[in-house]
Amino acid sequence: MTTVLTSPSRRTRSRPEASRRRRLPLLTATGALLVLLLALLGPLLAPHSPTAQLAAPFQQPDGRFLLGTDVLGRDVTSRVLGGGRTIVLTALAGTAGAGAVGLTAGVLAAMMSRRLGDLLLRCVDALAVFPALLLVLVLAAGFPGSHIALVAAVTLATAPFSTRVLRAAADTVLSSGYVEAARSRGDSRWAVLRHDVLPNIAGPALMDTALRLVASLHLTATAGFLGLGAGGAAPDWGRMVSENVPGATLAAAPFLAPALLLVLLSVCVGLLAGQLADAVGRGAG
């Protein structure tokens, strides 16, 4: 009889690897949640009015102004706390809109006949011809100060990609053996959609939603950087970066703080999307 011995070093290495694999999703989720809470609840915690000119421009941090003042002498801490809500809510609304359009159009295209499904997909693809930033510029400039126009622009810019992803996922499910068996025994299209298609594309839909959220954050922050959306005095992380970059040699916090928060949120959500993709892939395997 042959005895196979496992190297102790291999056993001890597997435990830290598993621990790191479990710890990374927790860290990324915690980072994303903290930034989201800061953005949504920050206006309630602001020590000063985010639009009031309280001191000299680019004043260094002190006991009164924890992050100093910006280009117009406004409190940077208050503007950072108040500048994320609009970006996050707009990005979330645009992501929800794109997800609804993508799920509806993608599943319909998969369940229709091949010719009608391709025709529907071509209609949706017509939106993808226009650069995303151009859609944002046109709608936001046509309806100045309108958050609804910005949400619509983000939705239209990202929905075509969700449609293609979810159509492919639905096609895979519909071509599987158990769905064909359900159809052969007389199950209705609604029953197949409810019991077979939607539960089995939930993973790809969640993964796609996370990726679209990153794209929506980038588009919304870019709109703020270009001065679109809410009025110029209202705090906005994207606008804060563009306003305060000229004074970077005098004070770094006014533009660096909002930029780091945007980067942290985008990176954490992107990492969560990648981890979700891995989990979906392992489940499928």
Image (cartoon, helix red, strand yellow):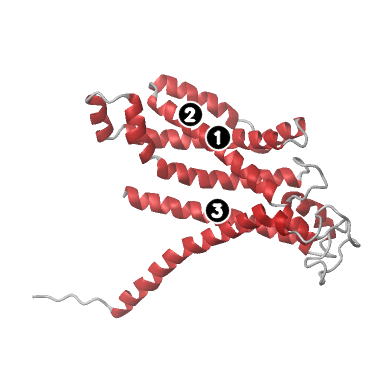
SS of the residue at dot 2? helix
Disc 1 crowd rating (10 Å Cα; few below 14, some 14-19, many 20+) is: many
Q: Amino acid at mark 1?
A: Ala
Residue 162 locus on image (x, y percent): 51, 37
User: How far separated are the C-alphas under marks 3 and 2?
Assistant: 25 Å
Q: Earlier in the sequence, mark 3 or mark 2?
A: 2
Q: Which mark is residue 105?
A: 2
Confirm or deny contact between disc 2 and disc 1 (CB under 8 A): yes
* Horizontal arrangement in the rendering, residue 251 relative to residue 178 (left or right): right
Q: Amino acid at mark 2?
A: Ala
In percent of the image, x 47 and y 30: which residue is there?
104
User: How far separated are the C-alphas under marks 3 and 1?
Assistant: 18 Å
Q: Is residue 233 above or below residue 157?
A: below
Out of 187 and 204, give the one closest to the viewer: 187
Q: Which residue is mark 1?
A: 159
Residue 8 locus on image (x, y percent): 29, 79
